[in-house]
Amino acid sequence: MTKHEQGSRRRRRGRRPERRPQRNSITRMTTRDETSAGGLVVSGLAEAVDGDNVDLSRIYVALIGRLDRRGRLLWSMPKGHVENGEDKHVTAEREVWEETGIHGKVFADLGMIDYWFVSDGVRIHKTVHHHLLRFVDGILNDEDPEVTEVSWVPVSELIEHLAYADERKLARIAHDLLPDLARKEAAAGKATPR
């Protein structure tokens, strides 16, 4: 018997059969869908119009800041979970009020973001509907325990304030929509409540 044959024989004798996982023993991660809504409360639309020009530095939006795990303050749009049977516009208005202290009324859709993440061993597909809300009343406050800070930010500085790329894309959309919306507000004789 050659050395090669001896090695093959040893491998065959010493070889254990491969264990293949049985289909029913594979554990699949539970997946759940979640839906949230929120957006940007806008103040000063009509007041930013001067003839045909719209000064975006005179239009303000309310943002929330939260500390991340490293202690950095990350700014984002207020938003929260859609309750069973609740309309997304109602959710946006409620969540904005809860997180900022500002009452707003939805007047335009801004866009949708969806993403995946894992929490407590569950894979979650989150869809967030964003809107533009017209300022109605209220005073900024950070009483919501999930929020570290709240602030009025000029639309001219909005994109660079936001921490998340998907929200920056929505901010660009808002940046493009707001001049025409401001002109319509001014033409209709509307003014921001003081």
Image (cartoon, rainbow, N blue to C red):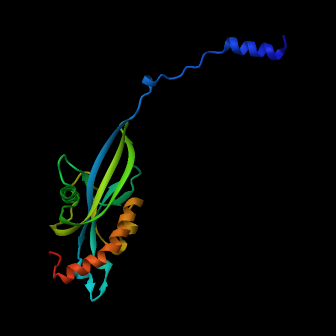
Q: Relative to 107, is 8 above or below?
A: above
**Any part of residue 56 in sight:** yes
Q: How many marks?
A: 0
Judge left or right: residue 144 versus residue 76.
Answer: left
Q: Quadrant of the C terminus?
A: bottom left
**Any part of residue 164 in sight:** no
Place of residue 91 in the rendered image (x, y in percent of width and height, measured from the top left):
20, 55
Q: Quadrant of residue 39?
A: bottom left
Q: Relative to the observer, which residue lies in front, 138 or 24?
A: 24
- Seen as rendered, the residue at the extreme bottom is 51
Q: Relative to 25, is 139 above or below?
A: below
Q: Relative to 73, is 84 above or below?
A: above
Task: Identify the residue shown where x is 53% and y is 22%.
Answer: 20
Task: Identify the residue shown where x is 32% and y is 78%.
Answer: 57
Place of residue 143 in the rendered image (x, y in percent of width and height, measured from the top left):
20, 56
Place of residue 133 in the rendered image (x, y in percent of width and height, measured from the top left):
22, 66
Task: Identify the residue shown where x is 25% and y is 52%.
Answer: 80
Q: Relative to the observer, which residue lies in front, 74 or 169?
A: 169
Task: Identify the residue shown where x is 85% and y is 13%.
Answer: 2
Q: Quadrant of residue 128?
A: bottom left
